[in-house]
Structures are given as C-alpha cells and as structure tokens.
Image (cartoon, grey):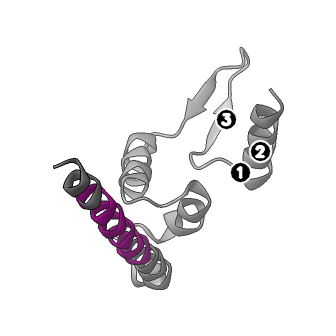
Amino acid sequence: MRSGWARRDRTARAGPLLASHRLAGGHRRYDADAPAVVRRIRALLDAGLPTRTIRDLLPCVRQDGTVALCTLDTLEQHLQGLDDRISALRETRSSLSVLVTAARAEEA
C-alpha cells in the first residue's frame, strides 16, 4: 500500500501526462484532442521512454507523432542507453553460453 501512495504522490506533484478536469459528479473530462495525445504518449512509451521523460518531451511531439529537433539530445541519450544495455546483455549471454557448452561437454 505504501508504494502505491508514493507513486500517486509523485504523479500528483509532477502533473499528469494527459490534461483533464473534473465534472461536478467527480468524473474526468478530457479535451477533444485527448485521443491524439494518448497515441503520441503510447508511441513514446513503446519506444521505451519513461513517463518523466515523456512529460518533458510531449510539447515537442508534433500532431502527426513525429518529434521536433528539441527532443534529439534526450532521444539520443536513451538510444545510447539501450545500445549499452544490449552490449552488456550480449556479453552476459556469451558467458552463459560458455557455461552451458562446458556443462554439456562434461555430460557427453
């Protein structure tokens, strides 16, 4: 329960990704462009970007979903991070493969 509260608290302080307002009955009401904004957010999430980064980049995402030049540094940093993780995973896989091969050789 505590971690859920902390997450809600962080989200409340940082602000939502999708603007809305409350109706008298407490229901949320979204702007007419909300479906397009959700698609842009989804595309950025699918690209592996965390919501805190998306919040900063969203103003630089065009209506058609392409990104403006103002996002380039951030996107390149995240791309480099992925490349570094992929490289580390390849090294880990190679080490594990050596262990598996050695174990199979002993078995034979």
Labels 1 and 3: the sequence-earlier one: 1
User: Is 4 contained in the magenta span?
Assistant: no
Image position, residue 56 (x, y; %)? 59, 67
Q: Residue at x 22, y 52 (%)?
A: 104
| Front-most of residues 12 and 19 | 12
Number of numbered discs present?
3
Residue ID at (80%, 51%): 13
The picture places residue 8, in percent across and down from the top left corner, at 75, 38
Give how far apart the Cα atoms at labels 3 and 2 are.
14 Å
Residue at 54% x, 35% y is: 30
Kindly indicate whether the residue at mark 1 contacts the one at mark 2 (C-beta within 8 angstroms): yes
Residue 100 highlighted magenta (yes or no): yes
The one nearer the camera, 29 or 53, is: 53
Q: Outermost residue, left direction? A: 108
SS type, badge 3 = strand
Q: Which kind of residue does numbered mark 3 sit on?
A: His
Could you tell me what secondary structure mostly forms the magenta stretch? Answer: helix
Identify the residue under disc 1: 15
Q: Write down the residue under mark 2.
A: 12
Which residues, given as a range, are shown in magenta? Answer: 83-101
Q: What residue type is labelled 2?
A: Ala
User: Which dot marks residue 74?
Assistant: none
Q: Is 75 on the left-hand or right-hand side of 9?
A: left
User: Which mark is drawn over residue 21?
Assistant: 3
20, above or below 75, in the image: above
Q: Do the residues labelled 3 and 2 touch (CB within 8 Å)?
A: no
